[in-house]
Amino acid sequence: MIHEVDEGIRRLLVAGGVPGDRGDLAFDAPTTDWTARRNAPTVNVFLYDIREDLSRRNAGNTEVYDEDGMLVGLRGAARWFELSYLVTAWTNRPQDEHRLLSEVLACLVRVERLATEWLTGSLAELGLSVAVQAAGPLPEGRSSNDVWSALGGELKPAVNLKVVSPLAGEWTPTGPPVTEGMVLQSVPQAEQVPTSGGRRLRYDGPTTAEGEGFAVPRSRPLPTGRRRRGEPIR
């Protein structure tokens, strides 16, 4: 799911013309080594925090059907996660960085969720909304200073981007539909070999199972002295 969110953000920025033909778009950690290797204006989208939204946790399974209305499997409830990114601009001049970062901010604040055409893989299959919030507060207990210190670099202006995305639940495929009944055979204890034929359990619908079905109507003589149900008492 994480790589699919990355791809959704990439498509969002590309659709907004950022950075366009003027530079590169990267998802690397902006460490000092990465900065030294950079040789073109770059917009960097760095994922630094992943947390589950416990308020949206659910339980249970959802039945999934194919185009013919046949049950094909069970899908567990999706779990939701908050992915936090720092989006930065890197050029050789601060003025150019601020101009590029302004374009990034203008692109991100235009949307509240990733459009359907930007979703791939499991996110596209689930059909659930992927929310986007730009320039919001950092998660509790975090600050940009902490992030930059961990990266070993200097503090740099950045747009905080939060994406709330579902993680698909466990998939359990179902077997093919039942078309035949169950056949029971008795085995005499002395012989230990199956008797001929069998008795099929009551089952409505077509079947190729052989044997004498329980649901098959047949006449049986009543024991002497017993009456049929519904007959008057004599």
Image: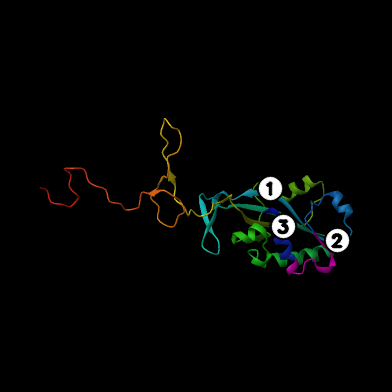
For the N terminus, the quadrant is: bottom right
Q: State yes or no: residue 24 in magenta.
A: yes
Q: Quadrant of residue 192?
A: top left
The residue that disc 2 covers is: 91
* N-term mark: 3 or 1: 3
Amino acid, disc 3:
Asp
Amino acid, disc 1:
Arg
* N-term mark: 2 or 1: 2
- Determine whether label 2 and label 3 are within 8 Å by CB: no
Q: CA distance from mark 3 to mark 1?
A: 22 Å
Give me the residue at 79% from left, 55% from top: 156
Q: Is residue 73 above or below residue 108?
A: above
The residue that disc 1 covers is: 142
In magenta, the rendered stretch is: 14-25
Give the crowd class for mark 2: few <14, some 14-19, many >=20 residues within 10 Å.
Answer: some
In the rendered structure, find residue 180 and report the number of the disc placed on it. Answer: none
In the rendered structure, find residue 6 and report the number of the disc placed on it. Answer: 3
